Image (tube, rainbow, N blue to C red):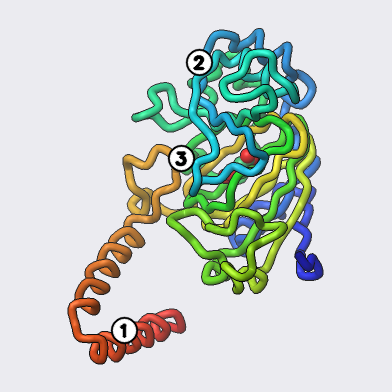
Amino acid sequence: MNNSNVISVPILFNLEEAKNWIETKREPFILKNFDYGPCLKKWNVDYLSQKAENRLVKIHVSTASEMDFINKNFIYRTLPFAELIKRASKENQTDFFISENEKYYLRSLGTDDRKDIANIKAEFPEIADDICFPPLFDKEKFFSSVFRITSSNLRLWTHYDIMDNILIQVSGRKRIILFPPSDIEYLYMKGDKSLVLEVDNPDLEKYPLFTKASRYECELNPGDGIFIPSLWLHNVITLDFSIGVNVFWKHLDDEFYEKKDIYGNKDLLNAQKAFLFTDKSLKELNSMPLYYKEFYTKRIIEALKDNLNK
Ligand SMILES: O=C(O)CCC(=O)C(=O)O
């Protein structure tokens, strides 16, 4: 991949500037020098495994370094938290599900994982006070806080979330690649995920427009937090055994979001309705003979394009 068009994610040191950036620019940045709390010194394998030893957590287990949501090259399993931490921090396993070099990915869930939104204060009360979230949003806009524990050298596919988010890196390093929502037409989406899995070595015969997308990159180190605005696509490569937490919050008023969306990845309600009408519209277009279908499809495309400029 030609990296000449890579934009480095800017680094901010000042909270006021960060807040202003969120409201006005709505672009990613790394917030450095914020005091994220004692987690930075305390959170290691021994401490975390003693604190939340027997709590059961659902995890992704993968033998590949690139998790692939299309071919599902991973399985879901459950482990006690202490065992997960122990295994994820090692390269080779003596106890394993698939093979001795399998990798683990925890994205923590709510207390009742079918009803509750993840909140580390509820699921991990013993350690929740070790981490301070930067005051980048009003308290009533809080949506979730999610523990992320990952084996080294594991990649999570490119996706977007509908909430704003700060991903706080506590231990280990991550490489993060981001694409702006304005370039969505170059990213070959399937739902909230991009079909281009190998973002460093894309199949350009299959995805020829991919190189047109602007690409932002950064390395996240312990003590850094990256702001990932809603709808920005992100691909995350965990370079070392890694511990992090992200906090999601609502950028918009409650009425825009689906109430039952516990993961924060369902499209805005208005967008869901628009997709539904698009499906109906396609059905109507397809019920006409080709000669008419082409004509009216082009007229509808023009109407949509006009709408972008309004
Ligand atoms: O850190 C990770 O592994 C993924 C983070 C992520 O997807 C997010 O912050 O939305």
The three-letter amino acid code for the residue at tag 3 is: Glu
Give left or right: position of 142 versus 173: left
Q: Which mark is residue 56?
A: 2
How far apart are the two marked residues, 3 and 1, measured between alpha carbons? 44 Å
Q: Residues within 10 Å of mark 3 (few under 14, many from 20)?
A: few
Considering only vertical position in the picture, is 65 above or below 192? above
Is any part of residue 135 visible from this angle? no
Residue at position x 35%, y 87% in the image: 298
Q: Amino acid at mark 1?
A: Thr
The percent coordinates of residue 157 (x first, y second) are 58, 48
136 to the left or right of 185: right
Q: Callout 2: helix, strand or loop?
A: strand
Q: Visible in this render: residue 255?
A: yes
What residue type is disc 2 on? Leu
Q: Name the foreground residue: 68 vs 240.
A: 68
Rendered image: mark on residue 124: none
First of labels 2, 1 by sequence position = 2
Q: Which residue is mark 3?
A: 140
- Which-is-in-front pick, marks 3 and 1? 1
Mark 2–mark 1 Cα distance, whole angstroms, equals 51 Å
| Residue contact between numbered discs 3 and 2, judged by CB atoms under 8 Å | no
Classify mark 1 as within 8 Å of ligand 1 or not, answering yes or no.
no
Q: Secondary structure at mark 3?
A: helix
**Residue nearest the observer in this picture, 208 or 269:** 208
| Distance between the alpha carbons at the discs numbered 3 and 2 | 29 Å
